[in-house]
Image (cartoon, rainbow, N blue to C red):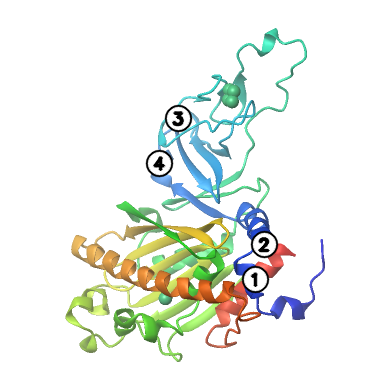
Amino acid sequence: MTSVSSNTIAAPLPAHWYADERQARDERELIFHRSWQVAGLSKDVREPQSMTTAKIAGMPVVITRDADRELHAMLNVCLHRGAVIAQGSGPAKLLQCPNHAWVYGLDGKLKSAPRTEREDDYSCEGMDLTPVAVLEWGPLLLVNLDADAEPPLAELATMQESVERYGFAFDQLEPMPEQFEWEIECDWKILIENYLECYHCATVHKDFSQVIDVSPERYALSSDGILLTAHAPVRDTSKVEQQQKILATDGGPVTDSHWHMLFPATTFNVYPGEGAIEITWFWPTGVSKSKACCIFFKMPGASDQYIEQLTEFGIQVMEEDNALCALMQEGMASGAIASARPLPKSEALVVAFQKLVRRALA
Ligand code: FES
Ligand SMILES: [Fe+2]
């Protein structure tokens, strides 16, 4: 392991890290394949003998619940000739490879490998599916490709508390049926850095800034472990435009907004009003290319009208951000500057994020 001095850790990331093939490969392996990522919804494996599949920064994963209700997660790649085994979600008693019909149990153990017994020199020893770490967290399934990884319990508890403080049971959040996905021509770090500061909100998110108090005095930033958080109250509702009123405090019990980012790239947003959260997670798909997936969850008692308007609001903000991020990507990749220079106070979470990136790569 290379040692990194605290000065190096504090230095802004070099601009070329946002458009470099080797850097992208290192980040995929050292960050995305060693951290906790959203892999799906708990409801997809609620029943015994069920499974669901996901990709974690390109790596196929299968999550199962066995007949004894135990949860398992494995790489979804056959040890024989490398075919992806399971697709989609649904009931499952076994996992059978579509190629040569090898069968694995829901715990990933190889159960049968036809015709291998006819081979003189072939052992199926050690050919179980590769396990990965899995955790059911309220309505979500999280996985970490590092099977020995410890779950970030303190960080998860902080996010959960920002829902439960309003009297909502985290387990009862109801996922909306529609999931949104974007492909963005942009390095994932630009998207996350954009998320982590609201210095741009007054310029870019006019509607958002009418509802949420984005002034530096009220928009509070904090970091704890791998959780970076912004917290802001809603503005005085009498000044809020009619179409945004539904998100204001007189529309429900949630008086503040909470914007969490679990490193490296999972965002957890608690919206004001009747109560909803949005979870969006990002991952790199190549050099300067990323994807994002977003699900809204309704808190018990929130109206359909509220969730509809909130979804529209959240997507509008996301699209405003994506357009802006494309401009930052172009500039950072151009070679015109050696690095960005985030503001230590207003962009403190960008600075904290860049330190976490450097630490993860060190
Ligand atoms: S590749 Fe899976 S059984 Fe051959
Ligand atoms: Fe933004």
Q: Is residue 213 above or below residue 278?
A: below
Query: Can I make out residue 302 in this image?
Result: no
What's under tag 2, amino acid-wise? Gln
Inspect the image, locate mark 3, and give the three-letter code of the amino acid beneath it: Gln
Of circles 1 and 3, the one toward us is: 1
Q: Quadrant of ligand 2?
A: bottom left
Judging depth in this view, the residue of 235 and 311 nearest the camera is 311
Q: Quadrant of the N terminus?
A: bottom right
The residue that appears at 61% across and 31% down in the rendered structure is: 82
Which residue is denoted by mark 4 in the rendering? 44
Label annotation for residue 23: 2
What residue is shown with label 3? 49
Identify the amino acid type marked 4: Asp
The residue at which mark 1 appears reads as 16
Instruction: Tell me how far mark 1 sits from mark 3, CA to CA.
Output: 47 Å
The local secondary structure at tag 2 comes to helix
